Image: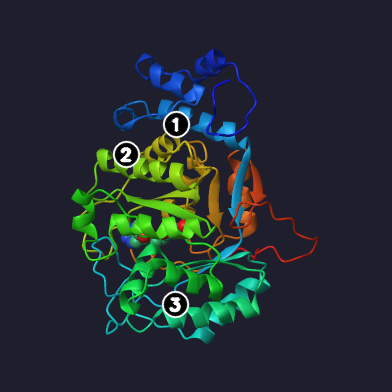
Amino acid sequence: MSDWYGLDLPPIDEPEALARLRLPPDLEDLGAKVVCGERLDFDEGLRLYAHPDLLAVGRMADFVRERRHGDVVFYNVNRHINPTNVCIQGCTFCAFGVKGTMPQSWEMSHDEVYERAAECAAQGATEIHIVSGVHPQYDLAWYETCFRGLEERHPEIHLKTLTAVEVAHFADAEGISYREVLERLRAAGMDSMPGGGAEIFHPEVREQICDTKCGTEDWFAIHREVHAMGLRTNATMLYGHIEHARHRVDHVLRLREFQDETGGFQAFIPLAFHPENTALDHLPGPGILLDLRVMAVSRLLLDNFAHLKAYWIMLGPKTAQVALSFGADDLDGTVVEERIVHMAGATSPEEMTVSQLRHLIEGAGRVPVERDTLYRAVVRKEGAPTGARTPA
Ligand code: V47
């Protein structure tokens, strides 16, 4: 059997698997590579973006997902907390970051963060996801105190905190290395890092949408340090704005190459651009067909990523459910409070209960499995809180 992404999977009858994909003749060569676990290259990625038969591309991605995960779809019980949205950056795709003088800005105290953490702890959350704008007064010491306070109060909750953009800012502001920033954050309680700030790595696009913040090399340098410290991170891609297919393929291939080196990424999360209240509000944003194609092509190219997340907050629950047949194996979590895309016009709810998440997964014919941040199955004692609230 061919080597399948380094995983020890049972052998399959490759010709039979290819036949079951029912591909049009001009995708059969790619299908043959996919069933044998052979890597697809840049031009093949472009072909997948251009091919008119989206469902055939989706079937190939679903094959890869099923080989890795069978019927299982993951979700978690988590809460997002954004201590402040005041931001000195000026990313054109963003409606979340604002100047401190604007009425829609907020600045939480440590106690306000702890109140939110106590609420989610009472609901059985296993993860708190913390990111902010780049606020000049919310310095490294502010977050160290915050994480220590959370760690003391809820040592059992995993802190998935800050993006490479915030880490780069602290290193600049303090005149210390990325590693020193990260070591201090880890000592304070950081357990892993989310995948934000990646946007689009290609300079043709990055220079137009976020030229003031941490560049592509720095984003990777920071993730490299986190991985070298033995912690995991995620990776994202913001799509559906000014980028083209070649920029998306370039983006995921840079991630694939890096993952070959470090192996520290857990999940890839394509993020669907929401234009409202942003400097790019003349753009329509992606439709469902692009949402599904990005998921499928990413699954096919990222052969060394274990998980692809259909982040329901950005896709909306219904598209996220369909994306489970286009390569995604994870819906993310209960979230509870989401500001980044809701300030940019998202119409999805901000919270889903566990029963709603499980209902979506079961409706897709899959088996829901609650995971922690590191994708270990969570086993709850009977009667223990599960993050479930009464649906509104
Ligand atoms: O980097 C900002 C994106 C990201 C908009 O790692 C927007 O588990 C759409 O990275 N329309 C932050 N997207 C969020 C993020 C994330 C979310 C959930 C889970 C994880 C994880 C990571 O949000 C930013 C940017 O790419 N974003 N503005 C917008 N208008």
Q: Looking at numbered disc 1 in the image, what kind of residue is underneath it?
A: Gly
Q: Earlier in the sequence, mark 2 or mark 3?
A: 3
In the picture shown, does residue 337 fall above or below 317? Answer: below
Say whether marks 3 and 1 touch (CB < 8 Å).
no
Q: Earlier in the sequence, mark 3 or mark 1?
A: 1
Identify residue for label 2: 249
Please give the label number shown on residue 83. 3
* Residue occupying the point 58% across, 57% down: 373
Q: Quadrant of residue 298?
A: top left
Q: Which mark is residue 58?
A: 1
Q: Residue at x 44, y 22 (%)?
A: 33
> Looking at the picture, does residue 63 appear above or below residue 282?
above
The nearer-to-camera label among 3 and 1 is: 3
Q: Amino acid at mark 2?
A: Val
- Residue type at tag 3: Pro
Residue 313 placement, left or right of 220: right
Q: Quadrant of ligand 1?
A: bottom left
